[in-house]
Amino acid sequence: MAFTEKDLDNLSQLARITVKPEEKQKMLHDMQSILGYVSEINAVSGSVEREIPELRNVFRDDIITHETGSNTKAVLAEAPATEDNYVKVNQVFK
Amino acid sequence: MQKTVAQLHEELKKGTLTVEALVLGAKKTIKEKESEIHALLGLYSDTLIDAQIKKAKEMFANKTATMLTGIPFIFKDNLLVQGELATGGSKILENYHAVYDGTVVKKLKEQGAILLGRANMDEFAMGSSTENSAYGPTKNPHDTTRVAGGSSGGSAASVSAGYVPVSLGSDTGGSIRQPAAFCGVVGLKTTYGAVSRFGVMAMGSSLDQIGPFGTCVDDVEAVFDVISFSDPLDSTSLPENARTYDKPLKKIIGVPRSFVEQKGVDKEVLANFNESLKNLEKAGYTIKDVSVNHIEKALSVYYILMPAEVSSNLARYDGIRYGLSVPGDTSIKGYFESRTAGFGDEVRRRILLGTYVLSSGYYDAYYNKANLVKDMLVKEFNRVFEEVDVIATPTTPTTAFKVGEKSHDPLSMYLADIFTVPVNIVGVPAISIPTGKDSNNLPFSMQFIAPHNGEKILFTYGRALERLY
């Protein structure tokens, strides 16, 4: 399972992260060395009976817990661009 | 010698010390030392600090003060405090103000604790030296040419340098215990589910826990007692009736000998570890060699599961709703621009790694396999805890390393967490206790690991060890 430059390009597209040309060799080397290390787990064989975990998801009733709009101002204040009570984004297609 | 929380509480209660004087003293120490240490990313606003001082004074006046009332705290900068900056050590949140209080933050506010400042940290808690902070590394108060450890390096250094008696950090693979060890303070990683993570920036959600730092076990316990409770706002919070541990103590310490004596562990560290065990033996404890199958694989399991969760959790930083935004000419280009400009090298590396191990061709080989080994490790720990109260290891394979020594090689940095990582994989609690100093005058530490909900066992053992140093 050699990790190639093509893999790196593909992943950076999927993860929405640009790896600049001058960073590529170092990133490729780091990824190969880390993946080489963690691949040792493939030497573990066997199975384990999964127990029911003690932790359970906790759900609450689907009811409104605060007044509509009570947090809007504070939340929108952190958005890079807004218009009226909306978050403003660039056009998706060009 | 720094005063403990209990000592400060007595003085505040008697009136021989005022809350203002205590806070002023902390600010003075910070002013004197901070340019050298850089443990902090900033102080909280005067409005907040003054409001908490006022609250604390009222609580002392009307006799509702608790142990933590008036006690100054430093918080790791991944905890949200309403209206205050919270950067996570990242450029992408450089100007981000939290919109609400985290559960732990809210609790400590209610107790009249003084929220003093924000601790430096590796970006989004990814690192073992605080060198991955976008705001520069924290230096070790024992030797400023060395790292404070990480990722909660600022929280550990704040206590070690005497800014505050206690602080909070988060621990995903050792991020409390490792910096505690490097800085010579006590650090506690709590049981998974013990402390609410509502209002904490998520990194590896199946691993993250909040925990305290202090100069002694008593102080760490005092904070733990206040911050551990069931919280409906955190879906992984343990219910109140699932938090007890009532098995009697056996006074037996398990040592995974071949794991502890592996290659790369410093000779002085090993000698100190063995000496600590001997001293515990003299104090009436039995030392028993144990083997935990697959424990040497824990670091690999960690560097598969954690990046997988990181890649999902950090998808939220899109440059649209909050944080740094670098507009591209289309939305999708904006994602690339914002995330590339906002994230540092280690964060990008882990996101890419996580994306890889979750991709369809490699999911079985990495992610599923790692989960299998995780389940095996849980079983193994449970088996060993039938025979012993705690498992002991050195907290770290070496004492604090030099600034810049490992920053070029991620894998060598990851190995600094070799003894702490298994604990997060299994979800059990563990504590790091200082055990003297090496030939360079740098702190040694021992780690005790207890079964789920066994924090009180850790405090008992921690105090027993503390007495010997």
Image (spheres, coloured by chain):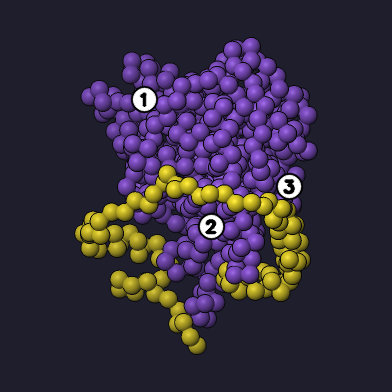
Chain colours: A yellow, B purple
Look at the picture and state if B121 lies above or below B143.
below
The CA distance from mark 1 to mark 3 is 41 Å
Amino acid at pointer 2: Glu
> Of marks 2 and 3, which one's residue comes earlier in the chain?
2
Can marks 1 and 2 be said to lie on one chain?
Answer: yes
Q: What residue is pinned by disc 2?
A: B309
Amino acid at pointer 3: Ser
Which of A12/B106 is in front? A12
Q: Residues within 10 Å of mark 1 (few under 14, many from 20)?
A: many
Identify which residue is drawn at 37% across, 28% down. Answer: B68
Foreground mark, 1 or 3, reads 3
Q: Based on the displayed image, in which of its 4 quarters is residue B150 positioned?
A: top right
Can marks 2 and 3 be said to lie on one chain?
Answer: yes
Amino acid at pointer 1: Met
Q: How crowded is mark 2: few (under 14 residues within 10 Å), some or many (20 or more)?
A: many
Which of B178/A52 is in front? A52
Please give left or right for residue B316 compared with residue B110 in the image.
right
Identify which residue is drawn at 71% across, 22% down. Answer: B274
Q: What residue is pinned by disc 3?
A: B412
Quadrant placement of the N terminus of chain B: top right
Q: Which residue lies furthest to the bottom in this view?
A: A94
Q: What residue is pinned by disc 1?
A: B67
Can marks 1 and 3 be said to lie on one chain?
Answer: yes
Q: How far across and down, in percent of the image, does residue B29 sit?
A: 52, 30
> Of marks 1 and 2, which one's residue comes earlier in the chain?
1
For residue B16, say whether it is visible: yes
Which of B312/A1 is in front? A1
Quadrant placement of the C terminus of chain B: top right
Secondary structure under tag 3 reads: helix
Foreground mark, 1 or 2, reads 2
> Of marks 1 and 3, which one's residue comes earlier in the chain?
1
